[in-house]
Image: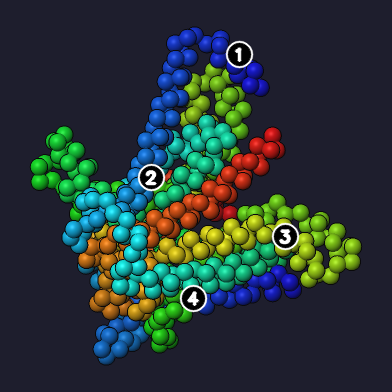
Amino acid sequence: MTPYLLLAPGILFLAVFFVVPLGFLAYQSLQSGNIDFGYSFTWAWGNYWHAIRDYRAQFVRSLEYAGIATALALVLSYPVAYWIAFRGGRWKNLLLLFIVAPFFVTYLIRTLAWETILSDNGFVVNTLQSLHILGPSGRLLATSTAVVAGITYNFLPFMALPLYVSLEQIDGRLIEAAEDLYASKLHAFLRVTLPLSLPGVVAGTLLTFIPAAGDFINAQLLGSTNNHMIGNVIQSKFLEQTDYPAAAAMSFILMGGILIAVFLYARLVGTEQLTGTAA
Amino acid sequence: MSAVAVERRERRNPLAGIWAFVKRNVLTVYSILFFVYLLLPIAVVIVFSFNNPTGKFNYTWQGFTWNNWRYWDGVPGIRSSIVLSLEIALVASLVATALGTAIALALVRYSFRGRASTNILIFLPLSTPEIVLGASLLTLFLNLNVIFGFWTILIAHIMFCISFAVVTVKARLVGFDRHLEEAAMDLGANEWTTFRKVTLPLIAPAILASLLLCFAISIDDFVVTYFNSGNRITFPLFVWGAARIGAPPQVNVIGTAIFVIALTAMLVNVLVQMRRSKGAT
C-alpha cells in the first residue's frame, strides 16, 4: 500500500499535465477550422501532409543542424572528458564545475552573448576577414554556421557530462593490461577505452540531439529566416498565427522524426547500448 | 601498481618518453582552449554589464560605467519579471521536490506492480523536446478555457521539474541502508518517528540537491513558459522581448548576478567535497 501512496500525487500530476496534454495535442492535430469560427474534430489527416509538404525544408534543417551540432559536441568534448577523467586528479569536481558553468547563465543571455561575439564588427569577424577566410562584406550572424555553432555551444555540457561519467568508471588496469599485451596507445584506446565509453557517447548524443532538434532560440537570435528550424514554425503557428491544428501536427511530426533518428542511431551502435543507458 | 608503471616507463626508449610527454600536453593545451571557448560567452556577459552603450544596442564596447549595476531595475518591467521568476522557481522547486522525493522513495525502497511503467513515465518528459511539452500544455489549457498567468506557468514548471527531482533523489538513495530504519523500528520508534529521525536526515542532501536543481531549471526556462504565460512576463521572457529591440545592459547585470550566486553555491559545495575527500585519504 505504501508505495502507491508515495507515488500517487506525483504520478497523478504527471498524468494530468503531461500525458493528458499529449492526448489533447493529438486531438487538436486532427481538427479543422479556424480561430474565429472555432475548430472541430474531423480526422483532418491533411494537416500532417500539408505540414510535410509546406515545411519539409525546416524539418530537414532541424534534423541536419541538430545532427551536425551533436557530432561537433561529441568531437569537441570527448578529449576534455577524457582529460578530466584520467588526469583530473583531485581537481575533477572543480573542472566539472567549469563544464556546467554555462548553465548558470540564463540560456537566452548566453545566446545573446554569442550574438555579440559573432556580430559584424566583432573580433571574430574582423579576424576572419583579415585572414581572408571571410570576404570583406562577409558575416557570421544570420548564417547556418552561427546557428549550428550556437546549438553546439548551448548543449555542450549535456554531451560532456555523460562522457565523463562513463570514462571515469573505466578501470585503468584494463588499459594497462592492453598495453602490457603490446597494444599501441592508439590500439588500446580504440579497442578498450572507446568501447567502454560507448554508453556515455550514446547518452550524450541523445541528450544533445533531442533538445537540439526542437530548438528555435538559436535560429531566431543567430540566424535569418533562411535558417529557421521547425521549432520556429511551430512557435509562430501556435502563438502568432493561432493555427493550432497545423502546429499540433508539426509537433508530432517533429517527435516522429526524432524517434526515427534515434532508432536509426540505435541500429548503428547496437540496441544493448541504448537500453543499457535508458534503464 | 604505480611502481610497476614507473619502471615500465623508464624501460622505454627516450623518444617514446618525449612523444608521450608531448601527447599528454597536447591534451592539456586542448582542454585549456576548450575551457576558454566554454567560458568566453560568460566573460562577454560580465564585461558588457559594465558597458556604457550610446545607442540601443549593447554590442560594441563604448566605455566603463557602474550605472547599470547601480540602476539595475532602471528598465521598466525588469524588476517585476525577476520577482515573478523567483516566486515561480521557489514554489515550483518545493512542490516538485516533494512530489519527486516521494516517487523516488517508492521506486528505490519498494518493489511493486507498475514499477517499470513508472520509470518510463518519469523518463518520458526528460526525452521530449521542450517545445512539445510547452505546446501540449498550451493545447490542454486552451481546450479547457483556463486563464493563462501565474498558475499556468507554475503548473508547467512543476511538471518539467518532477522528473529531474526524481532522478536526482534516486541517484543519492541507491546507496541507502535500510537496516538503519529497521534498527530504529526495532528500538520501538513508530513509522513517522523513524522517517523524521532516521530517513529524512539521511536523504537531506539529496533533497537539497533536488531543490537547487529545480530552482535553477525553473528560473532559466524560456520555451515552456513562453507557451503558457499569457501576458505575465518572467525574466527569460523579458530578455526575449528586450532582445528584439536591443537588450539593455541591465539584462547582463541580472545574468551576471544569477551566475555569481549559482557559482558561489556550487564552489562552496565542491570545496567542501574536496576537503572531505582529502581528509579521508
The amino acid type of the residue labelled 4 equals Ile
User: The N terminus of chain B appears in which quarter of the rendering?
Assistant: top right
Between the residue at mark 1 and the residue at mark 3, the CA separation in whole angstroms equals 48 Å
Chain letter for mark 4: B
Relative vertical location of residue B215 with respect to residue B11 in this rendering, above or below: below
- Badge 1 element: helix
Colour basis: rainbow
Q: Residue at x 84, y 70 (%)?
A: B190
Mark in the foreground, 1 or 3: 3
Tell if the residue under mark 2 belongs to the same chain as the one under mark 1. yes
The residue carrying mark 3 is B201
Between the residue at mark 2 and the residue at mark 1, the CA separation in whole angstroms equals 40 Å
Q: Quadrant of residue B4?
A: top right
The residue carrying mark 2 is B39
Tell if the residue under mark 4 belongs to the same chain as the one under mark 2. yes
Badge 4 crowding class, 10 Å Cα cut-off, few under 14, some 14 to 19, many 20 or more, is some
Q: Residue furthest bottom?
A: A37
Between the residue at mark 3 and the residue at mark 4, the CA separation in whole angstroms equals 29 Å
The residue closer to the viewer here, B29 or B73, is B73
**Labelled disc at residue B7:** 1
The residue carrying mark 4 is B155
Mark in the foreground, 3 or 4: 3
The first of marks 1 and 3 along the sequence is 1
Q: Residue at x 9, y 42 (%)?
A: A136
Residue B71 horizontal/vertical position (percent): 33, 64
Mark 1 and mark 3 in contact? Answer it, CB < 8 Å.
no
